[in-house]
Image: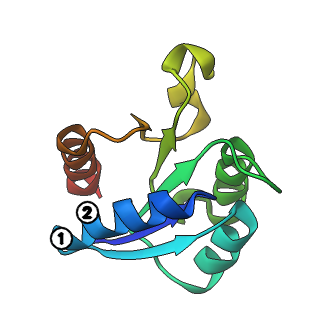
Amino acid sequence: MADILLIDDDMDMHAIVKFFLEYDDHTVTCVADGLEGLEYLRHNKSDLVLLDIAMPKMNGMEVLQNIQNEFGKQAPPVIFMTVFDRSQLSPNLNDTGCVGYIRKPVQFDQFRHKLRTVLDKT
């Protein structure tokens, strides 16, 4: 299946998402902040990045911008995972370069559907 990178500062989210995705035969790597995520991507291939928005050191929007600047067209697709309601995010969320948005707490049926949709396009 897919190699997925989860960038999130919530260790409980790491455990939950990793368990769920590995159940669906994905390989999951979890890192605690954007700097670790960027370093991981410099040395490893990921088919998809799941990215929290509110994190210390570097927020998700900054991480996404760095991914796009460093990797350009080779950048993996990014799905934001956040507690924020869509109305609290950029009104043009799709203009940020992300390919999707998943609201926490995660509804796993919707999550699975979003992942399949994105991974089928790659």
Question: Hey, which residue is sitting farthest front in the picture?
Answer: 12
Position of residue 97 relative to residue 32, above or below, is above
Position of residue 97 relative to residue 89, above or below, is below
- Return the x and y of residue 23 as percentages of the image width and height: 18, 70
- Look at label 2 and name its amino acid: Phe
Question: Hey, which residue is sitting farthest bottom in the picture?
Answer: 43
- Look at label 1 and name its amino acid: Tyr
Work out whether residue 41 or residue 82 is closer to the camera in this orientation and state it. 82
Work out whether residue 11 or residue 52 is closer to the camera in this orientation and state it. 11
Callout 2 crowding tier (Cα within 10 Å): few <14, some 14–19, many ≥20: some
Q: Quadrant of the N terminus?
A: bottom left
Q: Is residue 89 left or right of residue 18?
A: right
Q: Which residue lies under the disc numbered 1?
A: 23
Work out whether residue 115 or residue 19 is closer to the camera in this orientation and state it. 19
Work out whether residue 65 or residue 89 is closer to the camera in this orientation and state it. 89
Secondary structure under tag 2 reads: helix
Q: Circles 1 and 2: CB distance less than 8 Å?
A: yes
Question: Hey, which residue is sitting farthest right in the picture?
Answer: 57
Give the CA distance from mark 1 to mark 2: 5 Å
Position of residue 32 relative to residue 113, above or below, is below
**Residue 19: which quarter of the image?**
bottom left
**Residue 100: which quarter of the image?**
top left
Residue placed at 57% from the left, 28% from the top? Answer: 95
- Return the x and y of residue 119 as percentages of the image width and height: 26, 56
Q: Which residue lies under the disc numbered 2?
A: 20
Q: Quadrant of the C terminus?
A: bottom left
Q: Is residue 60 left or right of residue 46?
A: right
- Return the x and y of residue 73 as percentages of the image width and height: 53, 58
Residue 75 visible in the picture: no
**Residue 107: which quarter of the image?**
top left
Position of residue 98 relative to residue 13, above or below, is above
- Return the x and y of residue 87 as percentages of the image width and height: 55, 13
